[in-house]
């Protein structure tokens, strides 16, 4: 049986379109708009976008070792004590994290999906396949993109255009 060398970037085509929708939704927002919440106990629009960036970097860089070391600080953007990010900073984080993921997807083939990452996080051992991690980051982007869209829409601001 011949080995399949199809790039994962081809298989996951469409995620790149969603990335652009996220960027287009965040780019025009003011600091006041980024501070809006769907409810007081929920993350603000800016915090949701920072959380998306942090999760991408956490999984692809911190767990799977992708991208350069200058991405590591983005992994903590979601922490409560982190500075409020402007729209341009958030867009930059989305673009940098996306480029890291896109570079990895372009390099990996379907055979690479089986690789298992093992380690310890917060005292707990973990074992995740590359396939599970990629799917988890996709579902995370979609879930929190929806949350971001809902928060913007309830304040009469253009949401993600899908």
Image (cartoon, rainbow, N blue to C red):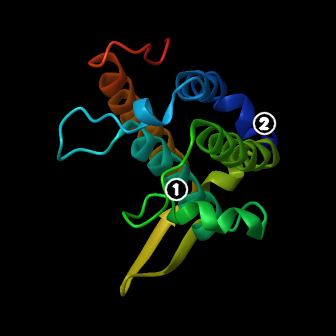
Q: Residue at x 82, y 48 (%)?
A: 107
Res 115 seen here:
no
* The image quarter in which residue 14 lies: top right
Comparing labels 1 and 2, the label whose residue is closer to the camera:
1
Q: Residue at x 70, y 51 (%)?
A: 111
Residue 147 image offset from top left, x and y in percent: 33, 32
Contact flag, marks 1 and 2 (Cβ < 8 Å): no
Observer-nearest residue: 27 or 148?
27
Disc number for residue 6: 2
* The image quarter in which residue 152 lies: top left
Disc number for residue 116: none
Q: Is residue 104 left or right of residue 120?
A: right
Residue 22 image offset from top left, x and y in percent: 55, 28
Observer-nearest residue: 95 or 26?
26
Q: Which residue is mark 1?
A: 54
Earlier in the chain: of badge 1 and badge 2, it is: 2
* Label 1 residue SS: helix
Q: Compared with residue 15, is residue 95 higher up or lower down, i.e. above or below?
A: below
Q: Is residue 11 left or right of residue 87?
A: right
* Label 2 residue SS: loop
Q: Residue at x 72, y 47 (%)?
A: 96
């Amino acid at each position: 049986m011949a080995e399949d060398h199809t790039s994962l970037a081809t298989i996951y085509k469409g995620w790149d379109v969603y990335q652009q929708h996220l960027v287009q939704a965040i780019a025009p927002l003011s600091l006041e708009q980024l501070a809006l919440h769907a409810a007081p106990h929920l993350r603000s629009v800016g915090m949701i976008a920072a959380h998306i960036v942090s999760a991408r970097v956490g999984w692809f860089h911190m767990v799977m070792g992708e991208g350069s070391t200058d991405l590591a600080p983005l992994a903590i953007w979601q922490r409560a004590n982190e500075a409020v990010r402007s729209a341009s900073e958030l867009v930059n984080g989305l673009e940098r994290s996306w480029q890291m993921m896109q570079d990895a997807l372009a390099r990996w083939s379907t055979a690479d999906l089986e690789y298992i990452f093992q380690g310890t996080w917060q005292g707990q051992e973990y074992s995740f396949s590359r396939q599970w991690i990629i799917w988890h980051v996709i579902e995370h982007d979609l879930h929190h993109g929806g949350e971001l869209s809902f928060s913007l829409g309830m304040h009469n601001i253009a949401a993600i255009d899908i």
